[in-house]
Image (cartoon, rainbow, N blue to C red):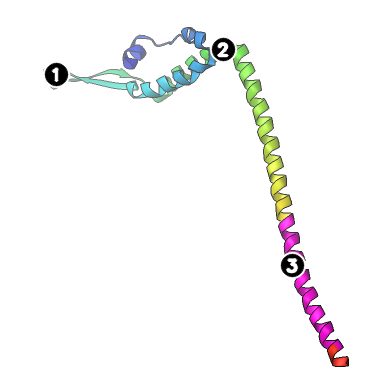
């Protein structure tokens, strides 16, 4: 059916999909992905050894049709696209802030670990020095 649609309609009208809003955009993109093999459609005649190429469309021409259809789809509902774009921009800002907070948290955790290692080293040095002081005191007594 997709191949027949591509053969019969060089320009696909996207307006009927507007009733479902942006939810139908991924469906339209998927339809074009599944229709891509139709760009080089060959039919074999069952009664002879003849093969006929029914549809031969370059990849560039197919991509142009696909982009034109998507452009018309988005152009038909600019307000919804802009609202969705703003929502996505807001999500991106929050994602950036979350990433910054997580990076800062990681830096602080590394700093805490570094300080713990330093404290452990100082405690070991303190024990060693106490041992030396104790040895010197015992030697003097």
Q: Which mark is residue 75?
A: 2
Find the distance from the CA under tag 1 to the CA under tag 2: 45 Å
Q: Is residue 39 above or below residue 104?
A: above
Q: Crowdedness of circle 1 by 10 Å Cα count: few (<14), some, many (20+)?
A: few
Q: CA distance from mark 3 to mark 2?
A: 65 Å
Give left or right: position of 49 versus 98: left
Pinpoint residue 61: horizontal percent, then vertical percent. Answer: 42, 20
Q: Residue at x 52, y 13 (%)?
A: 73
Q: Earlier in the sequence, mark 3 or mark 1?
A: 1
Say if the magenta span includes residue 140.
no
Which quadrant of the figure contains the N terminus?
top left
Taken as a whole, is the magenta stretch helix, strand or loop? helix
| Callout 1 secondary element | loop
Q: Residue at x 49, y 7 (%)?
A: 15
Q: CA distance from mark 3 to mark 1?
A: 85 Å
Location of mark 1 (residue): 46
What range of the chain is rendered magenta? 112-137
Badge 2, how many Cα within 10 Å: few under 14, some, many 20+? some
Answer with the quarter of the image where residue 4 lies.
top left
Residue that lies at the very extreme toward the right in this rendered image: 140
Labelled pair 3, 1 in contact (Cβ < 8 Å): no
Cβ atoms at labels 1 and 2 below 8 Å apart? no
**Mark 2: which secondary structure?**
helix
Mark nearer the N terminus (1 vs 2): 1
Residue 138 pos. (x, y %): 84, 89
Q: Secondary structure at mark 3?
A: helix
> What number is the disc on residue 120?
3
Tell us which disc is closer to us: 3 or 1.
3
């Amino acid at each position: 059916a997709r191949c027949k649609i591509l053969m019969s309609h060089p320009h696909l009208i996207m307006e009927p999909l507007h009733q479902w809003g942006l939810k139908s955009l991924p469906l339209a993109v998927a339809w074009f992905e599944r229709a891509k093999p139709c760009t080089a459609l060959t039919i074999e005649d069952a009664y002879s050894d003849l093969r006929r190429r029914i549809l031969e469309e370059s990849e560039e021409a197919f991509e142009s049709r696909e982009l034109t259809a998507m452009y018309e789809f988005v152009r038909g509902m600019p307000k919804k696209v802009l609202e969705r774009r703003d929502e996505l921009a807001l999500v991106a800002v929050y994602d950036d802030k979350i990433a910054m907070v997580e990076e800062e948290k990681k830096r602080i955790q590394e700093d805490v670990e570094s300080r713990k290692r330093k404290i452990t080293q100082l405690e070991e040095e303190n024990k060693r020095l106490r041992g030396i002081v104790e040895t010197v005191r015992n030697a003097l007594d």
